[in-house]
Image (tube, grey):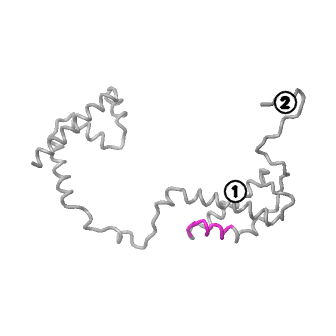
Amino acid sequence: MSRCKRGAPPARARSMSRRPAISPPLATLLAERRLIAARLVACGVPARDREDVLQNVLIAAWSAIQAGRYRPDPRADPRRALQSWLRGITWRQAGHHLGRAHIRREVPVDEPRALVDEGSVDPDGRLLARAALRVLVELPGHHRALLLAAAGPHPMTAYARAHGLNPATIAGRLRVARKALADRIARRLW
């Protein structure tokens, strides 16, 4: 690594472009709305979300321009340089939008209940579940409490802390309770 001499100006960061920052007017940016919309279609953004993502693209582009991060090649055609830059921003914003969990899992339908098959629950599974609940009630209280805590929303470490025990101890006792439940269910079924 080379060192700067004393009194020398600081070296320019390698990631910074040597080109000057340019600030095109907002109207020039807004004139490219059709290009941005076409890129959003090509990226697979649903029609219901395109206007929102288009606004995000314009806001991100304008923020970058204001921050001085738009530095096109001075030899390039200004409009083509702006369009290329906007394509990159559009692609990234579309990727962020499509990566959101609520977008990936959303399935819009007219009748949501039509997708649910009423006969999809296995009757044998229901009977086994009821039998397991009956056996669970017959277990000793400490086993039952551990099994119910393990099925609950809180981690077992919170259960251990609440009872003043080591989490490893709780894990061992939970194994014993699960084994006792499995043995009783097996005895019931045979």
18 horizontally vs 189: left or right: right
- For label 2, the crowd category at 10 Å Cα-Cα, with few meaning under 14, some 14 to 19 and many 20 or more, is few
Mark identifier at residue 60: 1
From the image, which quarter does the N terminus lie in?
Answer: top right
Which quadrant would residue 55 be assigned to in this image?
A: bottom right
42 to 183, vertically: above or below: below
Residue mark closest to the camera, 2 vs 1: 2
Q: Which is nearer the eye, 175 or 152?
A: 175
Q: Which is nearer the eye, 6 or 53?
A: 6
Residue drawn 18% across the image and 53% down it: 128
Residue drawn 18% across the image and 48% down it: 132
Element assignment for label 1: helix
Mark found first going from the N terminus, 2 or 1: 2
Mark 2 belongs to which amino acid? Cys
Magenta region: 36-46
Q: Are marks 2 and 1 in contact (CB under 8 Å)?
A: no
96 to 146, vertically: above or below: below
Residue drawn 36% across the image and 33% down it: 157
Rendering coords of residue 110 (x, y %): 42, 73
| Residue to which mark 2 is pinned | 4
Element assignment for label 2: loop
Rendering coords of residue 61 (x, y %): 72, 58
Mark 1 belongs to which amino acid? Ala
- For label 1, the crowd category at 10 Å Cα-Cα, with few meaning under 14, some 14 to 19 and many 20 or more, is some
Q: Main secondary structure of the magenta part?
A: helix
Residue drawn 89% across the image and 31% down it: 8
99 horizontally vs 130: left or right: right
Rendering coords of residue 62 (x, y %): 74, 57
Cα separation, mark 2 vs mark 1, equals 36 Å
